[in-house]
Image (spheres, helix red, strand yellow):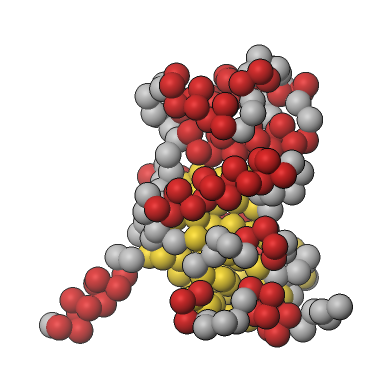
Amino acid sequence: MTNLILFSECEEIYMLKVYDLTKKYRKVIAVDNVSFNVEKGSVTVLLGPNGAGKSTIIKSVTGLLRYKGSILVNDLDNKSIEAKKCLSYVPEVPAMFPLLNVREHLIYFLKAYEKEIDEDKINDLLERFDLSDKQDKLGNELSKGMMQKVSICCALIVDPELIVLDEPMVGLDPKAIKELKKVVLQLRNNNKTVLISTHMLEMVESLWDHVILMNSGKLLGNYAKDEMGDKDLEYLYFENTGVDHE
């Protein structure tokens, strides 16, 4: 009985559980039997070189790809509507509705998630990411950097339990990168869970609690920062991936 109680308590600490995830594109295995858990209230970085399988995992988690295996979000099947309402997603390549303006994008997401329209919260996010003077611009009038900021705001406005970010800092200006880092740490402080996929070590060095290392579709290791002593993210990356460090 004691063991069962301990097991139950252990299970409750995870927001995301990935079991035996495999994804093939024809004959190419993009992700090869990968399993890992992501703790609630943590910042977990999915790290690896280009082609490691990171984006395939992210798209599988968010329900955009068919795959073999099992993925649970807050103990719910990730394909279910209930699970989808627990998470939000910032894709690597943002896509806007061409005929909605910036503000309408945020309102659209609030309605899609069946959330109350909070004008003050919308205004705060727009101001935080320097979009207040761009809020009337249509989706097809935005630069890549502005589209990325709108995508981030749309993900944040619904107050998700889990936010999934795929290379979120690519295309952002330095001020927006600094602001996004602040947001990530605030989310963690509020017991929200953040999963970041990236190959840019310097962008997440100050953020991570756990790192999941990938290469060539395989899981190389899952490390907790507080167990690594003086070993930093750069050490873990180059020591495990076999990528040359010049």
In this view, the residue in front, 126 or 36, is 126
* Residue 21 position within the rendered picture, expressed as x and y whole percent measured from the top left: 56, 69
Q: Quadrant of the C terminus?
A: bottom right
Classify 214 as above or below 89: below
* Residue 111 position within the rendered picture, expressed as x and y whole percent measured from the top left: 45, 25
The reply to whether residue 16 is visible in this rendering is: no
Classify 244 as above or below 107: below
Question: Where, by quadrant of the figure, is residue 94 drawn?
Answer: top right
Question: Where, by quadrant of the figure, is residue 136 drawn?
Answer: top right
Classify 68 as above or below 187: below
* Residue 16 position within the rendered picture, expressed as x and y whole percent measured from the top left: 44, 61
- At a point 53% along the width and 82% down the height, the residue shown is 228
- At a point 52% along the width and 83% down the height, the residue shown is 229
Residue at the extreme left: 1
Q: Quadrant of the N terminus?
A: bottom left
* Residue 76 position within the rendered picture, expressed as x and y whole percent measured from the top left: 37, 55
State how many labels appear. Answer: 0
- At a point 20% along the width and 84% down the height, the residue shown is 3
The reply to whether residue 5 is visible in this rendering is: yes
In this view, the residue in front, 79 or 125, is 125
- At a point 59% along the width and 43% down the height, the residue shown is 179
Residue at the extreme right: 246
